[in-house]
Image (cartoon, rainbow, N blue to C red):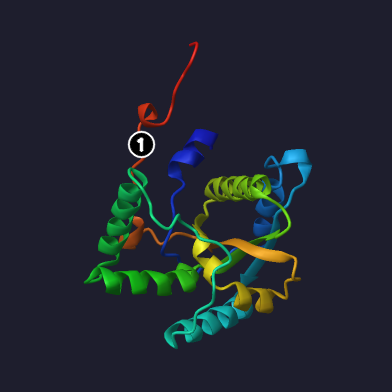
Amino acid sequence: MHVHEAVERRHSVRAFRSDPVDAALLREILELAARAPSGGNLQPWLVYALTGARLAEFKATIRAKFQMGTFETPEYAVYPRRLWEPLRARRSTAALQRYKAFGAGPAEDAQTLLQLRNYDFFGAPVGLFFCIDRRVGPPQWADVGMYLQTLMLLAVERGLGTCPQEIWSNWPKTIASFLQLPDTHMVFAGMSMGYEDTTAAINGFRTEREPPDAFVRMLGF
């Protein structure tokens, strides 16, 4: 598979088959993804992978807290408080696509359903958490982002689907306790990983991308 094919095929998978992911395969792509660039070669990413009984235990904990209305203060805001155009329109359009694909009724019901599915890792057999030392800055956050993208492209090459999930920043205390994180470490994001359920409607749409003229300025060419 060429790199451009992996880039084109990668999308956020929100329904997975129950087929397990081989531990050796997962370790292989986690290791290879570490070839991602990082400033000063700091390699600031820390990865926790859950499956089987441990993943089921964690999901049950989150599900119980969510249904009881127990919430935590997020480590960071995933989006700016007041989005401006065209960012606001892009986010709204993508959200409406997801709600429609889930086949839920009112937007409020669809949003709750989507949250529950997020907290279930969309049925994926592997749940990943990506952590970082809270003493680092934005450049190292970008490094972790590049690791995630590299990992997702490698997953496509291996026939796996993924869904990056910043929504896990909403549960810093529960995750830190479950993973036994030291106080210096925080959760940056999570990720669902497994084999895509290609029959699920939620996997049937693709969000649009802006043409280069909307974001590229070429000077001196």
211 to the left or right of 122: left
Q: Nearer the viewer, residue 195 or 86?
A: 86
Q: Nearer the viewer, residue 86 or 63?
A: 86
Residue occupying the point 44% across, 59% down: 196
Tell me if I can see residue 26 in this picture.
yes
- Write down the quadrant of residue 200 in the picture: bottom left
Q: Position of residue 80 (x, y in %)?
A: 45, 54
User: Looking at the image, is 5 positioned above or below residue 203?
Assistant: above
- Write down the quadrant of residue 108 in the picture: bottom left
Residue occupying the point 35% across, 52% down: 91
Extreme residue toward the front, this view? 82
Query: For the image shown, how many numbered marks are present on the structure?
Result: 1
Residue occupying the point 50% across, 79% down: 71
Q: Secondary structure at mark 1?
A: loop
Tell me if I can see residue 22 in this picture.
no
Q: Position of residue 81 (x, y in %)?
A: 42, 58
Q: Residues within 10 Å of mark 1 (few under 14, many from 20)?
A: few
168 to the left or right of 87: right
100 to the left or right of 145: left
Q: Nearer the viewer, residue 161 or 107?
A: 107
User: What's the amino acid at mark 1?
Assistant: Glu
Extreme residue toward the top, this view? 220
User: Looking at the image, is 136 positioned above or below residue 60?
Assistant: above
User: Looking at the image, is 111 positioned above or below residue 205?
Assistant: below
User: Looking at the image, is 25 positioned above or below residue 85?
Assistant: below
Q: Position of residue 158 (x, y in %)?
A: 57, 50
Q: Which residue is mark 1?
A: 210
